[in-house]
Amino acid sequence: MEKIKNFLRGVKQEVDRVAWPDRKLVTKATISVIIFSLLIGVYLWLLDVGFTRMIHLLLSLRGS
C-alpha cells in the first residue's frame, strides 16, 4: 500500500511541474487541427472521386 501512495505522490509532483497551455493557445491549436482535418478530408474525398471515375471509365472501356 505504501508503494501505491509513493507512486501517486510522484504522479502529483510531476503533474504540478507540467507547463499547461493557456486557453488561447488551446483554442488556436484546436481550430488548426479542425481546419487541417477538414482540408485533408476534402483532399482524400477528391482523390476517391477521381479514382472511382477512372476505374469506372477503364471498366466501361473493357466491357464494350
Image: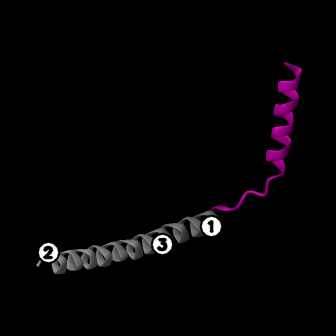
What residue is drawn where x is 63% and y is 62%?
23
Residue that mark 1 sits on: 24
Residue 44, placed above or below residue 3? below
Q: Determine contact: label 2, label 3, CB under 8 Å.
A: no
What residue is drawn where x is 44% and y is 75%?
39
- Secondary structure at badge 3 equals helix
Residue 55, placed above or below residue 20? below
Span highlighted in magenta in the image: 1-23
Q: Determine contact: label 1, label 3, CB under 8 Å.
A: no
Residue that mark 2 sits on: 63
Q: Amino acid at mark 2?
A: Gly
**Mark 2 or 3, which is nearer the eye?**
2
Look at the image and tell me in which quarter the C terminus lies: bottom left
Label 1 vs 3, first from the N-terminus: 1
What residue is drawn where x is 85% and y is 34%?
9
Q: Determine contact: label 2, label 1, CB under 8 Å.
A: no
Q: Amino acid at mark 3?
A: Ile
Label 2 vs 1, first from the N-terminus: 1
